[in-house]
Image: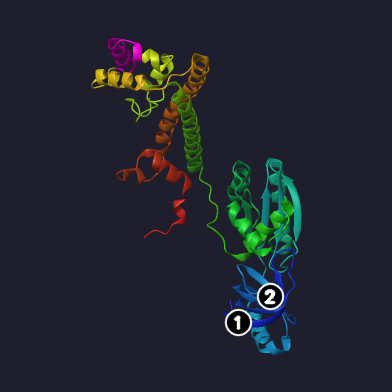
Amino acid sequence: MLGKQTLDVVELQEMNEFPQMTQGSLSGNITKSPRPNCDLLSFQGGLFSGGPRLPLLALRAVVRVRLLAPSKNNFLLEILQKEESKNTIRGGDTMPSPLFVGIDVSSEANVVCCLTRDDEKRPVSRFTVTNNRPGILEFQERITKLAKQLQSEEILFGLEHTGCFSTHAAMYLQRHLDFGVPRKVYVFNLSLIREFKKSHFLSAPKNDRVDAWFIAAKLRTGLLPHPFTWSEPLMALQRLTRTRYHLMQDLTRESNFLMTNLFLKFSDYTITGPFRRNKLSATSLAVMEEFESAEEIAEMSLDRLIDFLVEHGKNRFENPEAVAQALQKAARSSYRLPQSMSDSVNLAMASSIRMIRTAQEQLKALRKGIEDHLATIPQTLDSIPGIGPIFASGNVAELDVSQFKRG
């Protein structure tokens, strides 16, 4: 990088397949010198002033510019050409550029675009392979041949994180495939590529070929996240923690739906009833399911209601009589539901209660599996007061601690 310079330019070429032609003044950091007898420069960041339609443009990535008056900038060209000579090897040949491979992943196919630094826009190769094992092996063969042909000393692979569709491709690229040269794999958040695309071309078409080009172009900027790493124990733990999260979402949604029907059947149950703080306990669900209406609870004898609560609560209530009295009081003050609706509401509630109990049983099994799996992974999070195995597992599974500096 040669430092900050200000130039008059006649052409601003953004780093994509859709150049913008305009005239103005550009200030920024020159990152790449031109080839001999060429007045194209590359800038990293900076500001571009381009008249009333484009008064001020913040450059977020590398762009190419053409000098408005090269003769006025001969001193700069001489500096750039000297800088270029430092980047050559003996014999005058330019040092090999890394191969930047952008992969747009879908369920059926992987669309590939390969770029180098020698040509800012034109791909050196484009092809599509199926998103399965034969496809990834064909991909390996073609990229290995291309890297050998271009004499690339390194390959940078980039793909968007598309959940399960990108998992196998990233794993094979990082661990199982050999391309004959060192490689790094980068898995981008979808929003990162979307914003990068927007910053370079506001109305770029949305298709797999264009997306693959932008992923490769993002690799070329050098502004990259931590390389992708594959850890089987962490991925296995992640499957368990995400399944638990999915079930918790289902349980919350079903519980909220149950509460809407419960208000129709027993309006004061969650307001003044004894189970308002633990509405999904085993005893509370039994009360909702066993009694047809609030009137039945209000009219039954206190002793029978106490026996019911002791049986379903496994004799854990300190004062079951007070609980029974509070439940009957809530039943007496609740709205009365017409008999024509009562059967439908009870059937809907019974369906919700069965789903809630199933989810609760599965959550117990998942909790045990998570705790057992966490015990096999070296970590100290759950030794911190207030952090249990579930919270610790979520952090360990989702955060790659190797990305953080120690000390």
| Res 407 seen here | yes
Is residue 85 shown above or below 216?
A: below
Secondary element under disc 1, as helix, strand or loop, is: strand
Residue 299, horizontal then vertical, whole percent:
35, 12
How packed mark 1 is, by other alpha carbons closer than 10 Å (few <14, some 14-19, many 20 or more), is: few
Pick whichever of labels 1 and 2 is earlier in the sequence: 1
- The three-letter amino acid code for the residue at tag 2 is Pro
Secondary element under disc 2, as helix, strand or loop, is: loop
Please tell me in which quadrant of the rendered image residue 146 appears: bottom right
Is residue 285 shown above or below 231?
A: above
Q: Is residue 174 magenta?
A: no
Front residue of this view, candidates 113 and 193 = 193
| Numbered range of the magenta stretch | 298-314
**Residue where numbered disc 1 is placed:** 5
Instruction: Please state, as top left, top right, bottom left or bottom right, where the N terminus lies in the image.
Output: bottom right
Q: Residue at x 71, y 69 (%)?
A: 118
Is 287 on the left or on the right of 346, as rendered? left
Q: Is residue 311 magenta?
A: yes
SS assignment for the magenta stretch, majority: helix
Q: CA distance from mark 1 to mark 2?
A: 23 Å
Q: Residue at x 62, y 60 (%)?
A: 196
Q: Residue at x 36, y 22 (%)?
A: 333
Is 295 on the left or on the right of 324, as rendered? right
Front residue of this view, candidates 106 and 325 = 325
Residue 338, horizontal then vertical, whole percent:
48, 16
**Residue where numbered disc 2 is placed:** 52
Which residue reaches farthest left? Answer: 318
